[in-house]
Amino acid sequence: MRRWAPAGAVALALGSAAALYGVSYETRLLETRAQALDRALDRVEADIAAARADIAHLSRPERMAPLARAMGLAPPTGQQFVAESQLPRRPREQP
């Protein structure tokens, strides 16, 4: 029994080292993937910010007014508004 104890201890140490190496390797892979996802998220957030800036720039009133006038559009007049009582009733939707 005493002859096998050192061999068993060495085997357990080697097994533990192999398991620790496997966990360490997986951790590095997951960390690399998390960093890649972080970079992708940063790119998407930058794209969203750029799109919002484009929308804000393109929808400025001083830019839209000449375009609307060129299309024949004008601000609404008082005759275009109606009272709520003059609007037709909507039919109720059946569930």
Image (cartoon, helix red, strand yellow):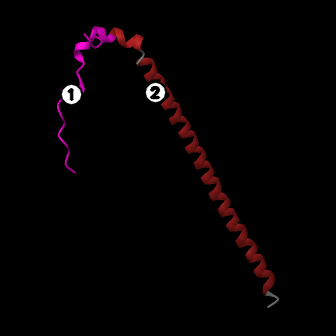
The CA distance from mark 1 to mark 2 is: 41 Å
Write down the quadrant of residue 17 in the picture.
bottom right
**Which one is nearer the viewer's eye here, 24 or 75?**
75
**Which one is nearer the viewer's eye here, 71 or 79?**
79
Spot occupied by residue 2 in the image (x, y as percentages of width and height): 82, 89
| Residue identifier under label 1 | 85
Query: Who comes first in sequence, dot 1 or dot 2?
Result: 2
Res. 54 mark: none
Q: Amino acid at mark 1?
A: Ser
Instruction: Report the residue at 70% width, 72% height from top.
Output: 15
Tell me, yes or no, whether the highlighted magenta stretch contains residue 75. Answer: yes
Q: Secondary structure at mark 2?
A: helix
Q: Is residue 72 above or below residue 43?
A: above
Tell me, yes or no, whether the highlighted magenta stretch contains residue 91. Answer: yes
| Residue identifier under label 2 | 51
Magenta stretch secondary structure, dominant: loop
Q: Is residue 72 above or below residue 26?
A: above
Instruction: Report the residue at 48% width, 31% height from top.
Output: 48
Q: Amino acid at mark 2?
A: Ala
Instruction: Report the residue at 30% width, 8% height from top.
Output: 69
Write down the quadrant of residue 42 in the picture.
top right
Spot occupied by residue 88 in the image (x, y as percentages of width and height): 17, 31
